Image (cartoon, rainbow, N blue to C red):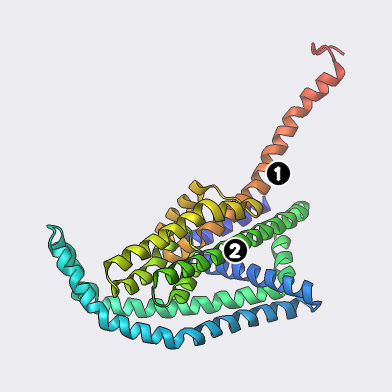
């Protein structure tokens, strides 16, 4: 009963305050990431777990800062070039679109006056500051959970009835382990996607190939949709080089996505955690439609967590026990009457 009450509470939180639920879950996911990295460093260096978490976070900050500082001058130069050459590329594209009957309507709807308004600008600013605030909250939740996970695990277990606390603690540990395995698989896939994208764009001669590879790696966190978003800035860069370069860029992203979908991800998930593709796509559609971009980004880890919770709480601890209970009288009859006629 206590477990059912906890699930009802989480479901109510998701319905009544979905943003709060998703921010908390993203913070917990960050906590698993920081904690896993801290444990890895602590095991190999002999330092305490807390120091390991701090060192891991520091390494991430230094890595991101180095990437920004190292590529900032080149990025600024290429961005200035893009700003100079993009209008002519847009003019050429507009001229081609006008050749088709549907072109005029698309251009009319794409006018800046139709896209930019006082209300849209205010909403954009508010959304930006809201996203920054949510990120800070997620970061602090992740750090607190990574530094002292046992306190929060014991707090959740304490809300369960004494008879199921041991089982509840086991389920929480398995759920955490599932998220760790999913993160390891996802980070490995993201790294491979980033390297392949960088190499492909570098070979075809796209400017800022390394930065675009980093963008592709980060957006690979969102399956199916992420690669499409990652291709947009590369295509914008290619517009300044002509249509042939655009086709080459599209080909690079298609090849990388094919390799990631049919080779990299199956091999990695075979060793870590496997999710049915239909479940992932369905969860993305549902979460994206209901909760927007953050729901889309968190759809896959939520699916992995949901599968683990359903398997451990409903299938193994309810359905399978019910099967064992119903089979017990049959075994008793067979033991007392080998002939199966019910006579002792």
Q: Which mark is drawn over residue 150?
A: none
Q: CA distance from mark 2 to mark 1?
A: 33 Å
Q: Which mark is drawn over residue 317?
A: 1
x then y, percent, for residue 153 = 71, 65
Q: Residue at x 49, y 73 (%)?
A: 214
Vertical relation: 53 (above or below) 217: below
Q: Residue at x 47, y 79 (%)?
A: 132
x then y, percent, for residue 105 = 15, 62
Vertical relation: 6 (above or below) 150: above
Give the quadrant of residue 334: top right
Q: Would residue 267 appear left or right of 222 to someone viewing this image?
A: right
Q: Would residue 68 appear left or right of 160 to someone viewing this image?
A: left
User: Tag 2, which secondary structure?
Assistant: helix
**Number of residues whose C-alpha sits closer than 10 Å to that of mark 2, classed few (under 14), some (14–19) or many (20 or more):** some
Mark 2 or mark 1, which has the lower sequence index?
A: 2
Residue 117 shows in this picture: no
Q: Nearer the viewer, residue 138 or 159?
A: 138
User: Tag 1, which secondary structure?
Assistant: helix
| Residue position marked by numbered label 2 in the rendering | 188
Q: Would residue 117 appear left or right of 219 to someone viewing this image?
A: left
Mark 2 or 1: in front is: 2
Vertical relation: 209 (above or below) 192: below
Q: How many marks?
A: 2
Give the quadrant of residue 172: bottom right
């Amino acid at each position: 009963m206590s477990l059912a009450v906890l699930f009802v509470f989480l479901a109510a939180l998701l319905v009544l305050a979905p943003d709060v639920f998703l921010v908390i879950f993203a913070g917990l996911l960050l906590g698993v990431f920081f904690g896993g990295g801290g444990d890895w460093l602590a095991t190999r260096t002999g330092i305490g777990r807390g120091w390991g978490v701090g060192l891991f976070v520091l390494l991430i900050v230094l890595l991101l800062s180095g990437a920004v500082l190292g590529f900032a001058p080149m990025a600024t130069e290429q961005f200035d070039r893009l700003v100079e050459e993009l209008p002519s590329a847009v003019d050429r594209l507009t001229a081609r679109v006008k050749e088709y009957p549907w072109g005029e309507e698309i251009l009319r709807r794409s006018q800046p006056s139709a896209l930019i308004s006082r209300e849209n600008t205010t909403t954009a600013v508010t959304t930006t500051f809201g996203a920054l605030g949510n990120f800070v909250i997620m970061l602090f939740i992740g750090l607190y959970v990574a530094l002292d996970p046992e306190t929060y695990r014991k707090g959740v277990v304490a809300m369960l009835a004494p008879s199921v606390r041991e089982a509840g603690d086991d389920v929480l540990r398995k759920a955490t382990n599932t998220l760790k395995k999913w993160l390891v698989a996802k980070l490995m896939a993201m790294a491979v996607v980033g390297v392949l994208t960088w190499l492909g764009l570098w070979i075809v001669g796209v400017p800022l190939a390394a930065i675009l590879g980093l963008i592709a790696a980060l957006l690979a966190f969102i399956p199916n949709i992420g690669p499409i978003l990652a291709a947009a800035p590369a295509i914008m860069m290619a517009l300044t080089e002509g249509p042939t370069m655009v086709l080459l860029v599209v080909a690079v992203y298609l090849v990388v996505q094919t390799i990631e979908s049919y080779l990299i991800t199956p091999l990695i998930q075979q060793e870590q955690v496997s999710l049915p593709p239909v479940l992932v796509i369905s969860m993305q559609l549902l979460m994206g439609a209901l909760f927007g971009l953050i729901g889309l980004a968190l759809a896959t880890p939520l699916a992995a967590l949901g599968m683990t919770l359903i398997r451990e709480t409903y299938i193994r601890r309810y359905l399978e026990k019910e099967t064992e209970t119903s089979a017990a009288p049959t075994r008793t009859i067979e033991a007392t009457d080998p002939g199966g006629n019910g006579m002792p």
